Every structure is written in C-alpha cells, then in structure tokens.
Image (cartoon, rainbow, N blue to C red):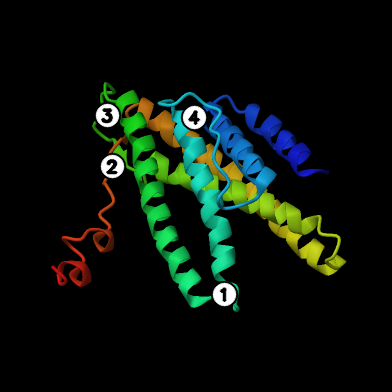
Amino acid sequence: MSYLARLASISIVLSKFSNMSFTNSANEVFNRCVTDYHIADHVDAPIANPYAEGSVEWTLYAKCWIDAVQWHLEDIIRDPAINPVEALAIKRRIDRSNQERTDMVEEIDSHFRKQYSAVAHLPEATINTESPAWAIDRLSILALKIYHMHSEVSREDADEAHREKCRAKLDVLLEQRTDLSQAIDTLLDDIAAGRKLMKVYRQMKMYNDPDTNPVLYGQK
C-alpha cells in the first residue's frame, strides 16, 4: 500500500470518532505539509503555505514545515565527513529553528486559550501534564516519522529483514498517532467541559536570552 493510500485509510479510521475533529484536521495539515516538503526535498526550498494566514491551519502547516526542514538538517549534520564550519552553521540554524518552533507552539496554545476563555471550571478541575499545543507538536513529528519509516519499508535497495523491521515500527507509529489523537481530543473535550484547566507555562529557554545566558551576558 502506498504512503498516501495508507494515510487515507488512517484518516477514515480517525473520522469514525465523533470527538476527533480537531486532530483529524491537524493530521491532514501535517500530512499535506510533509508531502509538499518532499516534492523538492531540500532544506532551502521555499514554503508555500496553502492556508489563510492567521488561521490555526496556517500555523500548523508552518510549524510542520519547520519540523520537516529541521529533520533533514539533523540528517545532514550527522555526516561524519561534514566540514566543521558547515556543521556549526547548521547547528546555529537548528537553534533558530527550535526557537521559531517554540513560538509557533505557544501561538497554537494561545488559540486554545482564547477559544476556551469563557469556560467555567468545575471545582474538581485538574491540570494536564502538558498543554494541548505541545501534544499537537508531537503529532507533527509523528507525521514525519511515519513518512520516513514508510520510505524505509519501500526501499528497494534494502533487504527484506530491514523492511520487515521497519514495517513493524511503522505499525507502532500509526497506532501511536491514533492513540495520541484520541488523547488530545479528549483533553480538548475536557477543557471545553471545564473538567481540565487551560493553563499554559511559557517556555523560558535561558540559553537563547542574552540577559540570562552567562556566556552571552559575560561578553558585554
């Protein structure tokens, strides 16, 4: 079964769950982004976001594109023959990419905070271990893992033992995405019903801040 056919079958399974609307949509955005990236399959290929700027879909696509570029930068930097100067430049690029990714995840959480701002919390409401957007971030990464693991399953230059090992891993990844999707939609339902608190702690990456990284502020 082709990669796109397999994705379509998973979408059909997901659509059977009435509470899967948000993650079903998010997974479609992520799948489209991963497929679009691999048309050129180059870390410097320009992004052509097909969604309306300002929409949550636009942010999901842009965030997944960052993930796709960073995935391939991580491949490149592991080349044992890479020039050290080039490797350092890529490391700096990955650092910037991580900050952009964090900013977009927090933007998605802001979307949910606004959406559920009027919800009255139940007295027994609890806080989840992570915010909705950071769980959705994991869905984006899973889309990439599934795409690349499917590529390994289809590799003609690999032996059957390799393909079978990757086929088993692919099945686990697909199951993981189904479980994570259900968990995210359950969390969103709980927030909408007041059973969970929509509370977000902003990331405070001190090494990116020239006022909190001692190596940086020590140079002033």
Name the residue type under label 4: Glu
Q: Residues within 10 Å of mark 3 (few under 14, many from 20)?
A: few
Give the mark toward the camera: 3 or 1.
Answer: 1
Instruction: Quickly name the residue at label 2.
Output: 200
Q: CA distance from mark 3 to mark 2?
A: 18 Å
Residue 82: assigned label: 1
Instruction: Quickly name the residue at label 3.
Output: 122
Q: Residue at x 61, y 33 (%)?
A: 28
Marks 1 & 4, CB-CB < 8 Å contact: no
Mark 3 and mark 1 lie on one chain; the one further toward the N terminus is 1
Q: Reply above or below: 208 against 61.
A: below
Give the mark toward the camera: 1 or 4.
Answer: 1
Marks 3 & 2, CB-CB < 8 Å contact: no
Instruction: Quickly name the residue at label 4.
Output: 57
Q: In the figure, residue 81 lies in which quadrant?
A: bottom right
Name the residue type under label 3: Leu
